[in-house]
Structures are given as structure tokens and as C-alpha cells.
Amino acid sequence: MRKNISLILGIILVLIIIAVWVLSFVYMPYPPNEMNIPDKFLKPSIDSEHILGTDNFGRDILSRIMYGSRNVLLVGIGSVTLGTLLGIFLGAVAAMKRFANTIIMRIMDGLMAFPGILLAMMLVAVLERGIQGSIIAISIFMVPVFSRLVYSMILDTEALLYIKAAKSYGSSRKQIFLRHYIPAMLPRLITQFTSAIGSAVMIETSLSFLGLGIQPPYASWGLMLSESRQFFLSYPYLAVAPGIAIIITVLGFNLIGDGLNDILINRGNSNE
């Protein structure tokens, strides 16, 4: 792990965001949605009461960044968790029950044919704007990723001797799946899960930027970027803080995914 710079740097970045998330439940300088028009467009300053400045409604940017971490992590982690569970289930059913193979995998192929943000936009438009709609839409986008991963790994594992031995001893499909398939798939699932959180955060911020995600007056980093567009030339600092928060979060989870991939998969394959 000492030599795995990607993992170490990723953990540091994610810990920063988690620290901001935890602190938001304990302390915030100001209520994140409180407007104070006389104090609008205050520039960032260490000596000021508003360290990161205020927006066009006089709302404290630091408080909104902290509050936005709750929504971003909730949507990112929640959607990937839901998509992972559904994907594992559908991928396992498709691989272990041949009659469902064609139906499930063709549906997954159809979902993967759409770009992620486009599919999420279509689903949010059908469902509802906001946190719940974003979680459902992004989780549906994640389902084909994990279902195809599980499907391919089960088919690859079926030829192994210990799987054949378990079948010959009369173990049920459920027992084989829980005792043998899941442990064999776990390293790749962990790696994919971590990297997928970064993708989910990026999709959520894109939806909020387009007005399809988290709705005002609630804070979201993508929404803060969207609100800063018309003032960017005069007050560029409005976009800097949410932009940096998005970069740290997405980069952190992607680096952790790369680091775990090196430790759990690449190094394991080289040892074999």
C-alpha cells in the first residue's frame, strides 16, 4: 500500500469530503438557505465572516458547500448501492437460469446503448426531479454495469474445479452463489463499486446543473455551478468552490478504484 500512490491520494481526498460531510451535521457557519441581500457578492477572505464569500442572494458559500456534500454523497453512494444490488441479482439470474438469459441481457444491452447522462435525464423527466428521482435514475444506469460484470464472472467461474465439485455434492444454486461465486467476484465488485461512485457524483452534479436534479433552494454543487453562470465574469469565485468540491470527490473515488484494482486484481493475477 505504501507504493500505491493512487490509493493513498484517493483516500486522502475522500477523507476530506467525508470530514466536510460529518462537520455539516455538527457545525455550519450560517444556515445554508438563509438569504441576506445586503451581504450579496462578498468576496472570499480569511479575515471575513464569510471565508468563501457569498452568492447573489447573500447566502454563505461555505455553508452551502458543506450542506451540498450531504445531498451529493447521498445520491452518489445511494444510487450505486441500489444499482449494485439490482445488478448482482439480475446478472446472477441471467447466468444461472438460462431461460432468463436472453431477456435480461438484451434489456441490459439496450440500457447501455444510451450515454449515462442522457439516460439519467430521460429517467428523471419521467420520474421526478429531486433527490429520489436522481437516485432511481442513476441506479438504473448502474444496473447494466454490474449485471454484465456479474454475468461474465459467473460464466468464467463455472469451469473451475471447486464449482464443479460443489455441484457434484448436491449444493443448491443459492449455496454455490453465496459460498463460492460471491467471494470470487468480491474484488472486482469492490473496485467497480468505488469507481462507480465517482461516476454517479458526476451524473448527479450534471443533472443539478441542468435543473433536473436537486431543486432550489436546497444546495447542490451542480446547482451552485448553474446559478453562478450569469455572474461568472464578474464574480468567478462563485464557481470555484463547488467546482473544486466536485473535482476532489470524483477524483478521490476514481483514484481509490484504481488503487484497489491494482491491489485486489492486477497484483492477484500477477501472483497467480
Image: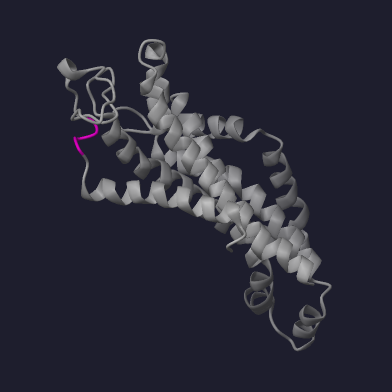
Is residue 223 among the parts visible in the rendering?
Answer: no
The image shows a total of numbered marks equal to 0
Q: Quadrant of residue 122?
A: top right
View extreme (bottom): residue: 169
Residue 32 part of the magenta-drawn span? yes
Residue at point 71%, 52% (across, down): 104
Q: Quadrant of residue 266?
A: bottom right
Relative to residue 104, is residue 140 drawn left or right?
A: left
Q: Which residues are magenta?
A: 29-33
Decide which of 39, 104 is in the foreground and name it.
Answer: 39
Is residue 11 among the parts visible in the rendering?
Answer: yes
| Residue 15 placement (x, y as % from top left) | 42, 52
Residue 269 part of the magenta-drawn span? no
Residue at point 72%, 68% (across, down): 268
| Residue 55 placement (x, y as % from top left) | 28, 21
Decide which of 169, 209 is in the foreground and name it.
Answer: 209
Q: Can you say whether 187 is above or below 195 in the image?
A: below
Residue at point 69%, 40% (across, down): 112
Relative to residue 85, is residue 28 drawn left or right?
A: left
Q: Can you say whether 74 is above or below 31 in the image?
A: below
Decide which of 186, 164 is in the foreground and name it.
Answer: 186
Decide which of 193, 128 is in the foreground and name it.
Answer: 193
| Residue 212 placement (x, y as % from top left) | 45, 28
| Residue 63 placement (x, y as % from top left) | 26, 35
Q: Quadrant of residue 184?
A: bottom right
For the N terminus, which image quadrant?
A: bottom right
Relative to residue 161, is residue 21 drawn left or right?
A: left
For the C terminus, which image quadrant?
A: bottom right
How are the colours assigned in the image? Answer: one colour
Predominant SS along the magenta part: loop
